[in-house]
Amino acid sequence: MSDAYIIYLEERYQGEVYGEAIFDAWARATGDTAVAEKLQVLARLEREMGGRLAGELRALGRAPQADPGKREEGEKIGGALGGAAWPGVLDGFRSQLTPLVEEFERAESLAPEGKLSLLQDVTAHERALLLFADREGAGQADALEPALDLLRSWET
């Protein structure tokens, strides 16, 4: 297994810890129940992806540990977002996610034989977050469908 692949998995795992903390704290901080429910789905997407990455790291003999600093930083950001205007936050969300999806697509080349599907799922989960922001910003009722579809596919 290449060092670059393992480092990427570890970085993505910490990113999932961070993302889950943001969405969880944001869901608790918002006064809008409908928004909180959406954010809880996104937190679940991050948690499930993090679990899949942690499983791969364990299979490689690593012991993934959530970085408390990442969790704390995510909680701070999520708490601050609780009072922010939803449309503006979605715009910022899209601007941050677009380059990440592109970066994750490029990183799929790090996958050793038989591991491409995991890295494709990393990209797909980030793309689902981006699609959520796009659809939610456009007022589409199905904004969560890409995230829910991905979660359902991981259950089988």
Image: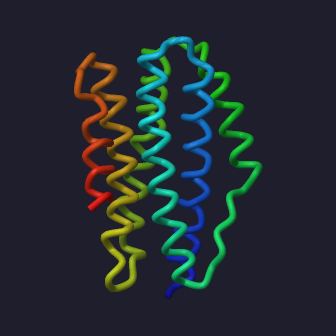
Residue 48 at x, y percent in the picture:
45, 54
Residue 28 at x, y percent in the picture:
60, 24
Above or below — where is 12 with respect to 148?
below
Left or right, residue 33 beside residue 17: left
Q: On the image, which quarter does residue 35 sit in?
A: top left
Which residue sits at x=26%, y=56%? 153
Which residue sits at x=37%, y=50%? 125
Above or below — where is 7 with respect to 85?
below
Residue 46 at x, y percent in the picture:
48, 48
Left or right, residue 96 beside residue 118: right
Q: Nearer the viewer, residue 134 or 75?
A: 75
Which residue sits at x=57%, y=17%? 30
- Which quarter of the figure is the C terminus placed in? bottom left
Above or below — where is 38 with respect to 117?
above
Which residue sits at x=61%, y=13%? 83
Left or right, residue 126 beside residue 135: right
Q: Nearer the viewer, residue 103 or 63?
A: 63
